[in-house]
Amino acid sequence: MLLTLTTTRVPATDLGFVLRKHPGRLQEFALSFGKAHVFYPEAGPERCTAALLVEVDPVGLVRQRGRPPGEGGALEQYVNDRPYAASSFLSVAIAEVFRSALGGQCGERPELATTPFPLVARLAALPSRGGEHWLRRMFEPLGYQVTATRLPLDEHFPEWGESAYFQVELAAEVTVAQLLNHLYVLVPVLDGDKHYWVGDDEVAKLVRHGEGWLATHPEREVIARRYLKHRGSLVADALAQLADESGADPESAAEVQAGEEAAVERPLRLHERRHETVLNALRATPAGRVLDLGCGEGRLLQALLKEKQFTEIVGVDVSHRALEIAAGRLHYDRLPPAERARLQLLHGSLMYRDERLEGFAAAAVVEVIEHLDPPRLAAFERVVFGCARPGTVVVTTPNREYNVKWETLPAGRFRHRDHRFEWTRAEFEAWAERVAAEHGYQVRFEPVGPVDAALGAPTQMGLFTR
Ligand code: SAH
């Protein structure tokens, strides 16, 4: 199996320093299951490519390990795709051969380890039994441009059809360590086949190699399940550790992502327009006590505070970090006592019933639902419309139809990496009508932002009243 890494960052041969493999030498490494070779098909100042060629010795493997229980017949032990297809063997080879680069270290030139390079990784044959769609779902949320070519089963016999293997190119501006860690985890996940061994230390490995990206990956649950071969208790353990990780420094990634979202939407001042529109909608009600559910960094709270109509304003968010930022923005500690008495910031999740949210006249839920996993929307509906039951609920969410208007937004991508979905107007309206009917509300819709005759407005708003 073959993996190549190419950079065009001048001087491109710096790649040799990061990988700690000299571009002028051909090197060979013994592995427990075969051999790895590292060489550079090209190494110029403008462009440099390092290749990792891994040879798996299936005969040696069978002799060494004996026949694994429950596996195919004798022939399958010797004749299989393991020598050719990228799999957990590639991850093991990366860990052995590029240990320091994988760990983000670069002895002589430490600054190179943390420098993002324009990088292209090519995998000659990556299995993805779930098809190209799965490949994209794994790598695109991490910012890769994915090019995948499905390989035929046998090029001499096209009538045999397609295989489950892809020649894959992944391009992004990332550090070498990030790229290697993404491959280390995701290649075996895509392969999903005979993973070497799954024990407790695999959880530690997953958490270590997933640091900084897996906790916020939209497919983290699938990744953990597949990486750990569906061993329930290990998966639960890994997910808990990942959740802790995202709790320890919860939104460093989310903040960057929020920045990206803002960058797409900034020319339209969409953030401000949304809050203005929601504020107007709330002002038009007799509401005095209002909730801002998923208040984030507190911009809407700031606007609400300026309106004397609102006598009690409660911001709720699941992210501690966002609440801290909100408290800073609102100068919570320095507010005059009468003002401070009007405002509360609560840490809580909209997934669970919370009595503190009951008895309010109105609630804003601005750009929050698209961050919830679709299977968990039902919990949100129960908590907000069934239990908290404010007299008015104002919900906003992106209108996916409008995305084609943004030249900078790659087709098929959401506005924000953490979005679990973005709905068309028809989808949002169908959802809202159903929720309203089930919980005794009426709903009407308003566009937010400039309206395109065919596509609608960039943001859609539902006004629920009871
Ligand atoms: N309403 C804000 C923030 C939108 S971003 C604004 O308009 O700027 C989405 C916010 O929802 C984030 O702050 C996120 O932490 C919060 N969130 C996501 N899931 C949540 C949940 N289950 N419970 C409460 N808040 C949640």
Image: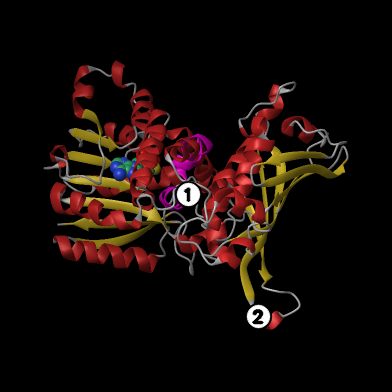
- Residue 157, image quadrant: bottom right
Q: What element carries label 1?
A: helix
- Look at 58% across and 60% down and name the residue there: 411
Q: Of the residues shown, which amino acid type is indicated by label 2?
A: Trp
Q: Of the residues shown, which amino acid type is indicated by label 1?
A: Tyr
Respond yes or no on whether mark 2 lies under 8 Å from ligand 1. no
- Residue 107, image quadrant: top right
Q: In the image shown, does 69 or 453 lie closer to the viewer?
A: 69
Question: Which residue is most to the bottom?
Answer: 159
Q: With 440 as the anchor, is 400 left or right in this view?
A: right
Q: In the image shown, does 324 or 462 lie closer to the viewer?
A: 324
* Residue 49 visible within the image: no
Q: With 333 as the anchor, is 355 left or right in this view?
A: left
Ligand 1 is in which quadrant of the figure? top left
The image position of residue 173, as x and y in percent, is 67, 42
The image position of residue 133, as x and y in percent, is 54, 63
- Look at 42% across and 46% down and name the residue there: 273
Identify the magenta region. 206-227
The image position of residue 276, as x and y in percent, is 36, 44
Q: With 292 as the anchor, is 296 left or right in this view?
A: right
Which residue is denoted by mark 2 in the rendering? 160
Q: With 185 as the anchor, is 238 left or right in this view?
A: left
The image position of residue 319, as x and y in percent, is 34, 34
Q: Residues within 10 Å of mark 1 (few under 14, many from 20)?
A: many
Q: In the image shown, does 191 or 334 lie closer to the viewer?
A: 191
User: Cα distance, mark 1 to mark 2?
Assistant: 30 Å
Q: Main secondary structure of the magenta part?
A: helix
Which residue is denoted by mark 1 in the rendering? 227
